[in-house]
Image (tube, coloured by chain):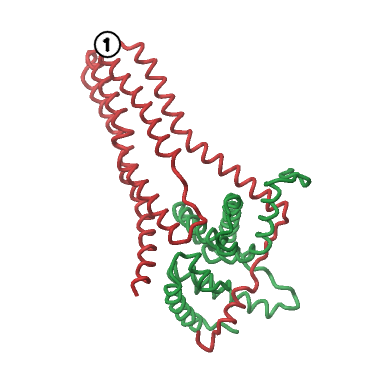
Chain colours: A red, B green
Amino acid sequence: MNSQFPDDELVKIWAADAAPVRETHEEVMALVTKRQKTFEKKIRVRDWREIVAAAIVGVFFLWAAAHSENLLQRVGNGIIVVGSVWIIYYLRTHRFHHIPSDPTLDIRSYTRQLFNEYEKQIRLLKQVKYWYLLPLYLGLMVGWAGSFRRQAQAGLMGPVLSAAFITGLFGAIWWLNEVWAARRVSAERDRMRALLSESDETKER
Amino acid sequence: MVLFETDQVGPDTEQKETFLDLVDRYGRALRRLTQVYVQSAADQQDLFQEILLAIWTALPRFRRESSERTWLYRIGHNVALTHVIKIRQKASRELPQDEQVFAVPAKDNLETGLIDRQNRRRLIEAIRVLPSLDQQILMLHLEGLSYAEMEEVTGLSSSNVGVRLTRARRRLSEWMQKVEVKI
């Protein structure tokens, strides 16, 4: 360090005037406990939200399959039921078995762990069309085909519009996951990559 | 609200005592760390609490294979890294700096206190413009960690830490000369 800013002066400036820990021991413990409860609740809600939604869809279409007018509709509803079970299985396997990054690791290892985590998230988002959208879309379209004759009696516009609506909705969900969300996660993954290469760069010097 | 029974003896009580002892000894250092990573007092408090939670959660797994100081700084920096990502994703960063960040000096030390505050603010600004890894190494250096300890926290070798630190100190010095810090 040059003569104007000797290290000990910098250390003094750094250590001076920092706000002390204002909370009492009881307050610190109350904060930690409250935060821990909130965190655990958030994780529980996140983990169960989509599973409950998939279960409701599954039960509804199971009922619909039992009351279907024809075989094609029954097959379509059945595909959705199987699809819902598959989605629950997939979410449980990929999310519940997820091990969060360990903050007690050194910064470099932690950054690598975050990088791998983002890579995994991107892979999952890019595959949404296969594990999430395809089974449901396929089931709905087979069911649609089953009810086509009845719907078409009142004109072709009705069935065409309903098929277009389903396709549009699934297209939007696909875009939100594979393009919009994946782009956001990719930006963070790239930041982690930059941090990692920053430390690699020093190693090479 | 009763969180822990005072007469309770067992792992929870021991964990609580160790935890509070760590907060007493390293709380200020962890607060300093939050001031570099996030700007507003609310974000700093939020990050500080998140670090405390991470320490509390990790404490039962602490095997004393590393010193408690390096262990704490690892948690502090790693949690801050994730916290900054969350803030960025919420796009709620860069709020105006809050006075709470810097404690108000006592009346008789007002002038010295104001210079201290100004210098400290400038130092923090100077650290913020450094690349992320340099920021971390410089903060660890200012907290008085040795090269070996910095190596433990960052995962870089001592020589790499040395290269980074020299460069960061040079940049910091240039920047502080530019803004005319009074010492």
| Position of A96 relative to B129 (above/below) | above
Q: Nearer the viewer, residue B65 or B78?
A: B65
From the viewer's perspective, is residue B161 above or below residue A130?
below
Parent chain of label 1: A
Q: Residue at x 37, y 19 (%)?
A: A61
- Which residue extends farthest right? B7
Q: Position of residue A38 (x, y in %)?
A: 58, 43
Q: Amino acid at mark 1?
A: Asn
Closer to us: A36 or B72? B72
Residue A152, horizontal then vertical, whole percent: 22, 16
Q: Is residue A56 above or below residue B83?
A: above
- Numbered circles on residues, count: 1
Q: Secondary structure at mark 1?
A: loop
The residue that appears at 24% across and 14% down in the rendered structure is A154
Residue A90 falls left or right of residue B58: left
| Residue neighbourhood size for the residue with mark 1, other residues' Cα within 10 Å, grouped as few (<14), some (14–19), many (≥20) | few
Q: State which quadrant residue B41 falls in.
A: bottom right
- The residue carrying mark 1 is A70
